[in-house]
Image: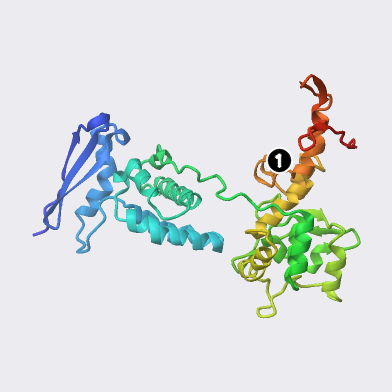
Amino acid sequence: MSPRYQRGSLRREKRSGGNDVWVWRYRLNGTMKQETYPAANYKTKTAMWEHLEPAVRALNNQSAEPVHVAPTLGDVIKRYMEQKLPKLARSTQNTQNGQLRIHIGPKWGEKVLTEIQPGDVQDWIETVQLSQVSRGHVMVLMRRLYKLAMLWKMYPVGFNPLSLVEVKGATTREEEPTILTPAKVTELVDELGPPYDLMVLATASLGFRVSETLALRWEDFDFKEEAVRVQRAYTHQELKDTKSASSKATVPVPAALPAALKEARGKQDLGWVFPSPVTGRPYAAGMILQDHIKPAAKKLGFGNVGWHDLRHSFRSWISSKAPTTVQKDLMRHAEESTTANIYGRTPVEGMRPVAEMATKGLRATRANQTLDILSWDLGARAPRRYAAVA
């Protein structure tokens, strides 16, 4: 005799705060089960039964294997790792694979999608042993999983509940960049041996991302025009396209760089500018940073210096010397706001001429004396004139 067809029972239950739910009860392998679904997602009992139809069919099939009557986040993760993750850059694959296997999967993988509550996720994300920025990345991935669940008809199309979860400080920089003056970069270059000295000089004087410096080829340079074309990036042992369309551009080569490059090039016209003698491919940025740049910077008393600090430093050098439109193009950003709001502040000496021009003529009366406020010498307690700035 074939097993009796079952549909289970469905009823609506009131919950506090008006968050009513549909409760579906059914038998699986002789055991009573129940699942709940937010009533806000299914306005009528008919709509709820329509959603449950695939689950009812699975419940009544003849397979001896247990079936997932309702999709879990683990089901979405599995499909994501099979269909979406392999298409991403290798560095992103590595990061998200860790997020899924170490954090998201173990905690939420067996949970039915409709039963995961934003409040529970909020409490959990605050306990995850990661930086605030990394926690923010985990939440971005979880929100994407829900969006894909809607696309794949595993979750009702509508409001993404995880958009309610906040990670404070996820978009703020945890540590201010270290801004080096041109003189300090020169000291760092002198402290390093080849080829690391030239890597630092090129990265700082061109304002490049290190991935762009390491991906340079000799044919990218036009020494006659003193220019270089940014065409690719090298990161996580992978050659790939530039970060954005704006990153792919031709920029001038400052006077400090051509002579050093030509000396390193010798008679080469083709090939990598910085090939590893071991692999013949570009160097790994992280190894150079840890083994050479950080120790040299620490020895010189410059603090914690990273590759991207050189790019921030470059922006600080040009900040008071060019309009933001030119700065944007030199940094190869798509928007001026990125250049202005994220990258290195203008140095004090760069701001001083502007501050003095803006406050020229400002006066203050003190001790029955009228003094030029810009001429007040706090050390000598006497008027002092600054030289005019052109």
**From what the image shows, is residue 113 above or below residue 282?**
above
Q: Can you give x and y, in whole percent of width and height, for residue 179 in the image?
A: 70, 52
Which residue reaches farthest bottom?
A: 278
- Colour mapping used in the image: rainbow
Is residue 8 left or right of 69 when viewed as pictured?
Answer: left
* Res 271 quadrant in image: bottom right
Is residue 185 left or right of 256 when viewed as pictured?
Answer: left
**From what the image shows, is residue 309 above or below residue 41?**
below
| Residue shown at 70% from the left, 61% from the top | 212
Which residue reaches farthest left?
A: 1
Any part of residue 230 in sight: no
> Looking at the image, which is closer to me, 314 or 241?
314
Is residue 264 left or right of 290 when viewed as pictured?
Answer: right
**From what the image shows, is residue 10 above or below residue 360?**
below
Q: Which secondary structure lies at badge 1? A: helix
Q: Quadrant of the C terminus?
A: top right
Q: How many marks?
A: 1
| Residue shown at 39% from the left, 61% from the top | 102
| Residue shown at 81% from the left, 67% from the top | 219
Q: Can you give x and y, in whole percent of width and height, for residue 385 in the image?
A: 87, 33
> Looking at the image, which is closer to me, 87 or 331?
331
Is residue 120 left or right of 359 when viewed as pictured?
Answer: left
Amino acid identity at mark 1: Glu
**From what the image shows, is residue 24 above or below residue 371?**
below
Q: Residues within 10 Å of mark 1 (few under 14, many from 20)?
A: some
Q: Can you give x and y, in whole percent of width and height, for residue 199 in the image?
A: 74, 66
- Residue at mark 1: 336
Any part of residue 240 in sight: yes
